[in-house]
Amino acid sequence: MTTPVIQDEPVRHKLLLFRREIEDEFRSILSWWTKHAVDEQYGGFYGSIDHQNTIDILAPKGIVLNSRILWTFSAAYNLTHQTSYLIIATRAYEYIVTHFADDALGGVFWTVDHSGHPFDTKKQIYAQAFTLYAFCEYFKATGQAMVKDRAIELYTLIERYSYDREQEGYFEAFAREWGPLTDLRLSARDANEKKSMNTHLHVLEAYTNLYSIWPEEGLRKQITRLINNFLNHIIHPVTHHQSLFFDERWHVKSTLISFGHDIEASWLLVEAANIISDGELVIRVKKSALQMAYAAARGLDYDGGMWYEQDSATNLWVKEKHWWPQAEALVGFFHAWQMSNDQAFLQHTFNNWAFIRESIIDNELGEWRWGVLNEATGTDKTVMSWEDKAGLWKCPYHNGRACMELMRRIDGLV
């Protein structure tokens, strides 16, 4: 990675101010989750909190939310050594192993009901990967051997049931008994296909974190294969956007472009290549990551916000600005600036942060709004108030991680 030389005092001052603002927001985010999300009646964390901080006590609880809480508060403790963060992480870990873990058949359930009983028992590989990712971070916080063992067990299950030994890559989902499912989708808006960019990205992310605590040779080979899956199948060689859905033979089954996933993958791929220390692969990945960052910048609006999707076949744009692409844009464009020293990327970061502060952060009630619409949909920055502030998908992972990544990166520069 090219490390920009901060010789310009105004730039250095701007970075230091940016870092202070980011740390303030980081602590505000974690404070909101600590104050509002803890379910003292039924255990764990509430399954749904709306945009006005109204709690749905009876909402089902999702493994994605709970594993992301575990990762975020574990990582926050590892960064700050603040005990209150470890307390929340431990609560999340204990709830997952008590209520989400399938002790009989392995893996974790998709959802439990409000009182912790199994609700949707499918084994989504995306969810297994996020739980693995979180267990690795919690192990770093606690050093407990059992936590590491649980992480390795999840890795073993993913490899046993999901890895495609014929065509490589990972299949999407299974029934509780690890048999086939007819509906493989993560959500209603997804295509019902055998493989997806999203699952591969987060399996790679989880395996990267596992390798940091367990540098096993078989795991190293799978990380290498995953990176090559992206380079050879997922990232378009001309547009440098990612295809989103595939059949088992890697035939593309979608024409959608997800700008948030493009910018997120651009830095996660480099992180994965770096951790296995494959010099030739690092060079290839960095080149591709920079091309992806330039491509993702097509999704930036004049106000710094990142749009959600574009259909490359119809040129239909979804000009909503959801919270998570904004968080990934912060990290991804900063990372692209670090790689290239192209000042446009740093300006993208600052512009995106200005948009987040203006339109995404809820300065009155706390945390980040789901997102805003804009004039392209007939409104002007209307808050998407029908969406949760905490729920099956809305969590402290994207924005919390963005803050922690930027704090570390700026500290390494100034």
Image: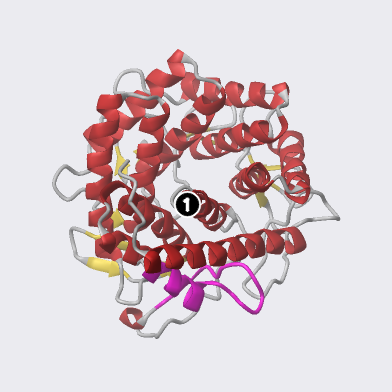
Visible residue check, residue 241: no
Q: Residue at x 84, y 55 (%)?
A: 40
Toward the viewer: 370 or 118?
370
Q: Residue at coordinates 59% horizontally, 61% vertically from top-left?
A: 23
Please provide percent x and percent y for residue 32. 69, 64
Establish if 68 lies above or below 30.
Answer: above
Task: Identify the image quadrant of residue 287.
Answer: top left
Specify few, some or many for label 1: CA neighbours under 10 Å numbering under 14, 14-19, or 20 or more. Answer: few
Image quadrant where residue 365 sits: bottom right
Residue 333: x, y in percent?
Answer: 35, 56
**The N terminus is located in which quarter?**
top left
Q: Which residue is mark 1?
A: 187
Question: Quick one: which residue is furthest to the top in this view?
Answer: 217
In-front residue for pair 350/133: 350
Magenta-drawn stretch contains 56:
no
Q: In the visual, does 224 lie left or right of 177?
A: left
- Left or right of 136 in this view: 95: right
Residue at 37% x, 71% y is 351
Return the x and y of residue 373 as percentages of the image width and height. Answer: 41, 77
> Which residue is rendered at x = 59% and y = 31% of the image?
176
Q: Secondary structure at mark 1?
A: loop
Amino acid under label 1? Ser
Question: Residue 354 in magenta?
Answer: yes
Decide if residue 30 is in sight here. yes
Residue 220, position as x, y percentages in the image:
42, 20
- What colour-coding does the image apply? secondary structure
Q: Which residues are magenta?
A: 350-373
As drawn, the residue found furthest toward the left would be: 238
